[in-house]
Image (cartoon, rainbow, N blue to C red):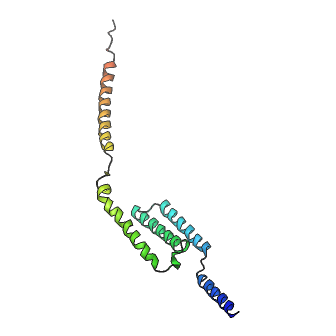
Amino acid sequence: MSHDAHGSHTAHADHESHDTHHVNYLAIFGILCVCTALSVIFDVIHLNKALTILLVLSVAVTKALCVMMFFMHLKFEGNWKFVLLAPTTILAIGLPLALYPDVGASYYTQTAPQVTNWADEISAYQAEQAKHGEHAESAETPAPAHAE
């Protein structure tokens, strides 16, 4: 009988150790809603573009941290999570850096060549049309008739 009492006491102690973190998910939901509203407000009001990007990205990072800490339960995990995240972080930073010379630096041009070429062509076309329009109007003018 003492063995059963000890077994139930151990099970009860294990159960208590898992209940040490209670999360108010409704409060986290409220924080995420406020963060979403803030990012929309920052986007709607017309601030400096760099400031808007900075504010919206900071709100997005805050939302991502809340989701990771509470909904993914990373706040309550041990330090082993950093061992798993280190290679992922290295790859996530290294891949864009490795691909930047091939894709990011030389592939895309800043302006579309069609815009500059077409703008010149349209200007030349309009000038020619205006010149031909004036020439056509002068040719259509009837010669004055002599009244006898």
The residue at the far bottom in this view is 2
Give the percent coordinates (x, y) of residue 69: 52, 74
Residue 115 relative to residue 4: left or right: left
Of 51 and 74, nearer the camera is: 74
- Residue in the picture at 32% in, 39% down: 118
What residue occupies the far top of the structure in this picture?
148
What percent of the width, then of the height, locates residue 101? Answer: 29, 58
Q: Image quadrant of residue 140?
A: top left
* Quarter of the image where the N terminus is located: bottom right
Q: How many marks?
A: 0
Direction from residue 25 to residue 82 in the image, left or right? left
- Kindly indicate the quadrant of the structure image that contains residue 105: bottom left
For the point 29% across and 39% down, which residue is it?
Answer: 120
State the residue in front, 120 or 66: 66
Side of 56 where 107 appears, left or right? left
- Out of 147 and 1, give the one closest to the viewer: 1
Q: Quadrant of the C terminus?
A: top left
- Residue sitting at 46 percent across and 65 percent down? 56
Where does residue 47 sit, x and y in percent of width and height?
Answer: 44, 62
- The quarter holding residue 58 reads bottom left
Residue 103 % position (x, y): 32, 55
